[in-house]
Amino acid sequence: MKEISLIQAKENEEVTIVSLEAGQMATKRLVDMGLVPETKIKILRKAPFGPIEIGVRGSKLVLGRGLAAKIFVKHL
Amino acid sequence: MIMKKTMQISNGVNEVKKLNVVLAGQANVGKSVIFNYFTGLHQHIGNWPGKTVEKAEGTLRYKDYSIDLLDLPGIYSLSTYSIEEIISREYIAFQKPDFIINVVDATRLERNLIFTLQLLEMERPTVLALNMVNLLKERGLEIDFKKLERLLGIPVAPVVAINGKGLIQVLDQGIRLVEKSLKPKPLKYGKELEKKVENLILSLEDVDLPYPKRWLALKLLEKDQRVKDIIENKKPKILEKAKKLSRELEKIHGEDSSIIVAHERCNLVSQIVNETVKITKPKKLSFNEKLDNLTSHKIWGYPIMFAILALLFVSVFKFGNLISSLLENLTSNWQQAWQVFFGTSIWSSLGWSIIESTLALMSLALPYIIPFYLFLFLLEDWGYLARVAFLTDNLMHKIGVHGKSCIPLVLGFGCNVPACLSCRIMETERERFLTAFLVTFVPCSATTVVIMGLVGKFVGIGWALSFYLFALLLILILGKLFSKALPGEPVELIMEMPDYKKPDLKTVFLQTWFRLKEFIFIAGPLVVISGLIIVTIHQTGFSYRIADFLSPITVKWLGLPVITGILLIFGILRKELILLMLATLLGTTNFSQVLSQHQMIVLSLVSMLYIPCVATIAALWKEFGWKKSLSITVFKIIFAIIIGGIISKLLNLI
């Protein structure tokens, strides 16, 4: 399964997290919000050049673009 | 209100026992509603000592208990990501509250439980207040409360905070835990992890710290820096062991041990949720969801946002101007009346200055800050501010901040004071400070008075408008620069997008009232005292001496007439005074008689860029402490002088 970064995923796609390649602080923040490997995510909305809204664990999260670029996912 | 009456009926026993209780939970779960319900007017909002994080405390009487209730900030974890998290975990570990009320949003159970598990690791008696259960049905969700209680090992109390339903039961459960000394039983994670945890707990046996041993062990495996530092001081050998165990875990799981621990928590939460939450009907788009689609829409979202922000802006400032003029009209004869009674001696002027400062503060606070706070909390409670952050994040990044900073910056155009106060919606101290700093460069309405009254009137409207462009350019450049210079990482936006919900008016009013009180407490003395100082300086003629003293800057460097010194001093109180004093001292409003066009441009520029007005300084003081507000003030003065001088020289070349 090919790995892509979260920003490359398209709206309404469902993906699974493979790995997190962000800095220590950012990674901590991500995992505290429940974004650990094997987590299922649905891409809800992408603002042009802007943040990404995802559905995860029954709630909606918004991630800045730079951060989303460091989350690697694969399609289900 | 029924709650209050119940609480006042004591159980007949005379002794009053004291309890220390804490409200903990993520943002947007209804914690403030519950806090306000329990404490009503018996609350006080200050700051944590030495920090610039809000501390909300209150008291209530229930049965024969006197309960001190502390509302911890809304946080997502107990790591060291933010100062709020550090404060919270240290409070729980050191103060050992009698019980914790963990407020959880029933419609977002899975994500909320991740925090619950972290909270339980702190091993204090905990009651889970499962809020918003009334919304479960319409979301197509069903929760088995009893099973949840069994799996978590703590009492679960379903609650509808905005109606007050179930809140007394939360207290009852908490008191029961205290009376029976019931602590939560530790919930076990994966086998491999637990083995390492037990190993570390053994090593920690002889370490004397207020934190639970299991918590320390987990934090060590999570590579928590603060815990590592504390342990290093007590028994550094453990750190090596923790490293070794981390590496063993990493070999097994293939991810960093800090991620492994979080992963295990998530696994346990998923398990619990699978066994307790049922999705009863497929989700169909509710009104709120349709609204969400519209307000976050790539194309339509922006005009809607402009409209709402414009509405915010216009209602606050139109209403503000209305009340402000009303107050001005009401009190316009007061100064004359005062002088009739008390003469025009210096003492009379000082007395009047106190009254005038109080009136000035009232005409700032009542008309502007109150509607601003009301509107802001309304928008926040409703959930709209998150949409603004979403839509503007990209643009804000160019300035060196992120989406949430948009609101304070926009508000700054009206008045810097509420704008600075609104910086608290940002999560980290760094973000807040940087945004507040940039806000002070946004030309407020008082600055607009100066720009329009001088440059707009006597030089040209084109020139006047270029001031605003210049301000925006400065914000862009300074933002980028200071974002790099300030310690700490620039924070990427990670934010929960809350569902739209009906704002709770009582909470909005209470939040407004208590924050206003805090602000007046700081701003009041500051405004009155600076008013007294400046009036004294002026009445004794000392202001002219100061103006002369400043002339190397004002005359030689800035190319302005000597009286500018006096103007700029008065400008510290309120920027409009720069023009008003000029008119008073000259006896005319035909400023072109005294100032050339170039001088008007330089004066307006310096007015826009230099010291923030006293009320803004007070707002900065309240939010960031005196050191930071002083540093912004000093920077701005020096910056304004430098830029003013450069522009002055440049203009002379044209």
Image (cartoon, rainbow, N blue to C red):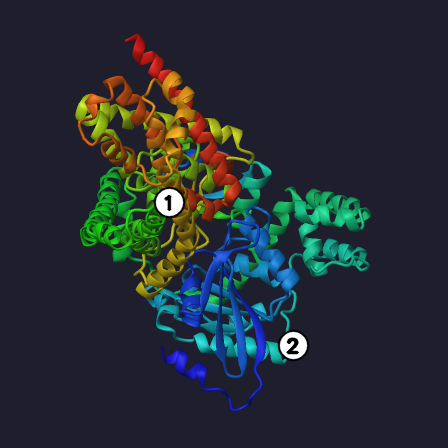
Residue closer to the observer: B472 or B189: B472
Mark 2 chain: B
Q: Position of residue B108 (x, y in %)?
A: 43, 59
Task: Identify the disc placed on residue B267.
Answer: none
Query: As shown in the figure, which amino acid type bears the numbered disc 1?
Result: Gly
Chain assignment, label 1: B
Q: Is residue A75 visible?
A: no
| Residue located farthest toward the top when viewing the structure as drawn | B653
Return the mark for residue B531.
1
Q: Dot 1, how many residues are within 10 Å of its Cα: few (below 14), some (14-19), or many (20+)?
A: many
Provide the residue designation for mark 2. B181
Q: In the rendered view, would you say B540 is above or below B464?
A: below
Mark 2: secondary structure: loop
Label 1's element?
helix
State which tag comes first along the sequence, 2 or 1: 2
B102 relative to B528 in the view: left or right:
right
- The amino acid type found where label 2 is placed reads Ser
- Above-or-below relation of B2 to B592: below
